[in-house]
Image (cartoon, grey):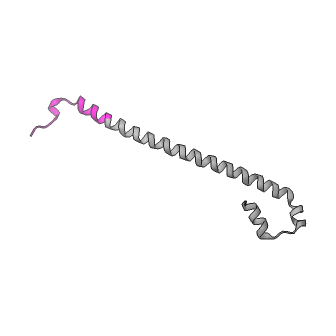
Amino acid sequence: MSKVDDLLRDKKLTSEELKLHEDLIKECRRKEAAIGEISMTTRENLKKLSETLSVMGENLKRIGDAADNIVLIMMPEGAFSRE
């Protein structure tokens, strides 16, 4: 059941009122269906975005670790303290 249909049922419109507003009701049902499709697409896109950002975060961590290793490799040996 759609929200439009729920509202129509709750308002208990007469058959004359339903006929009078038939075009508006059809338009609302079409828009409700379109909103449902758009919402599903948006959820799917947000899920993909989240997965992509997660992979990017992991890759950035690896890059940071690699950069730290490069810095250590490039440091002159005298820069390390010996105890």
Vertical arrangement, residue 76 with respect to residue 35, above or below:
above
**Is residue 45 rendered magenta in the image?**
no
What residue range appears in magenta?
Answer: 66-83
x, y percentage for residue 23? 85, 56
Please give the name of the residue rendered at 81% of the width and 58% of the height, measured from the top-left corner.
Answer: 25
Q: Vertical placement of 13 versus 69: above or below? A: below
Q: Does 60 appear above or below 19?
A: above
Splitting the image into 4 quarters, where does residue 9 fall? Answer: bottom right
Residue 16 pos. (x, y %): 90, 66
In this picture, residue 13 sits left or right of residue 40? right
Is 17 displayed left or right of 81 in the figure? right
Quadrant in which the C terminus appears: top left
Horizontal side, residue 13 vs residue 56: left or right: right
Query: Main structural element of the magenta stretch: helix, strand or loop?
Result: helix
Determine if the magenta segment contains residue 82: yes
Q: Residue 13 falls in which quadrant of the image?
A: bottom right
- What residue is at 72 percent from the left and 50 percent from the top? 34
Q: Which residue is drawn at 77% across and 52% down?
A: 30
